[in-house]
Image: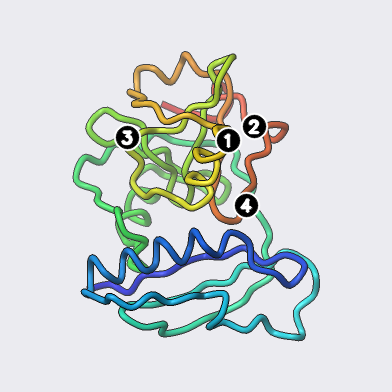
Amino acid sequence: MSLLFETIKVINKKFLSVSLHNERMNRSRYELFGCKDELNLGELIEIPSDITKDVYKCKVIYSDTIKDVEFRMYAPRKIEQLRLAYCDEIDYSYKYLERTIFDELLRKNNCKENDDILIIKNGRVTDTSYSNIALFDGKEWHTPEFPLLKGTKRARLILDKRILEKDILVEQLPHYEKIVLINAMLEFDMDKAYPTRNIIIT
């Protein structure tokens, strides 16, 4: 079985939303490995003293136990196009370290450096290769009810009622005006939303 990982945002030398990462990690450990003990990443991982107050990405690789931890300074990707990628057999309900299927879909859809894919599964809009999404219909922000992976930032935004879950079919995409990519490292910044007509390539 593939190892799993969590990506935690570190800013001002502090972890963000670590409780949500703990919850997903411990749920995965229980469901995949039968672990009944609960790990607390905030207590187990020491933030290096030599990092700055900039934004860092902490990657925690684990199975039943933590296998490795690495810190890297973070720089967001600039996405210029999202290409629709159809794949009904994809399953990424756990945050596996093994991501070959995403690499294959990126190659199959001829994605360049600043391109990504918006994955369509069984006619439904799901995620990009590395993020959940939120779509604006002119009144509300919706996130797919059936994502490939239920991200921690997505969970927080739903709890805060800033986005609403909705079953979004691929043919409904033209009804949306804007799209935002969201994950543990990417904030829900409506000012940085992409116009869907400019970015989604069918």
Which class describes the residues within 10 Å of circle 4: few (<14), some (14-19), or many (20+)? few
Residue 26 pos. (x, y %)? 36, 68
Q: Quick one: quadrant of the N terminus?
A: bottom left
Sooner in the amino-acid sequence: mark 1 or mark 3:
3
Left or right of residue 118, residue 178 in this image: right
Label 4 sits on what residue type?
Answer: Arg
Residue depth check, mark 4 versus mark 1: number of the one nearer the observer: 1
Cα–Cα span, label 4 and label 1: 13 Å
Cα–Cα span, label 2 and label 4: 14 Å
Residue linked to disc 2: 193
Judge whether 119 appears above or below 175 on screen: below
Which class describes the residues within 10 Å of circle 3: few (<14), some (14-19), or many (20+)? many
Sooner in the amino-acid sequence: mark 4 or mark 1:
4
Number of marks in picture: 4
Residue linked to disc 3: 120
Label 2 sits on what residue type?
Answer: Ala
Image disc number at residue 180: 1
Left or right of residue 200, residue 34 in this image: left
Left or right of residue 120, residue 112 in this image: right
* Residue at image point 56% right, 55% down: 184
Residue 5 pos. (x, y %)? 42, 69
Q: Are marks 1 and 3 in contact (CB under 8 Å)?
A: no
Label 1 sits on what residue type?
Answer: Val
Residue 90 pos. (x, y %)? 24, 48
Quarter of the image holding residue 161?
Answer: top right
Q: Quick one: quadrant of the C terminus?
A: top left
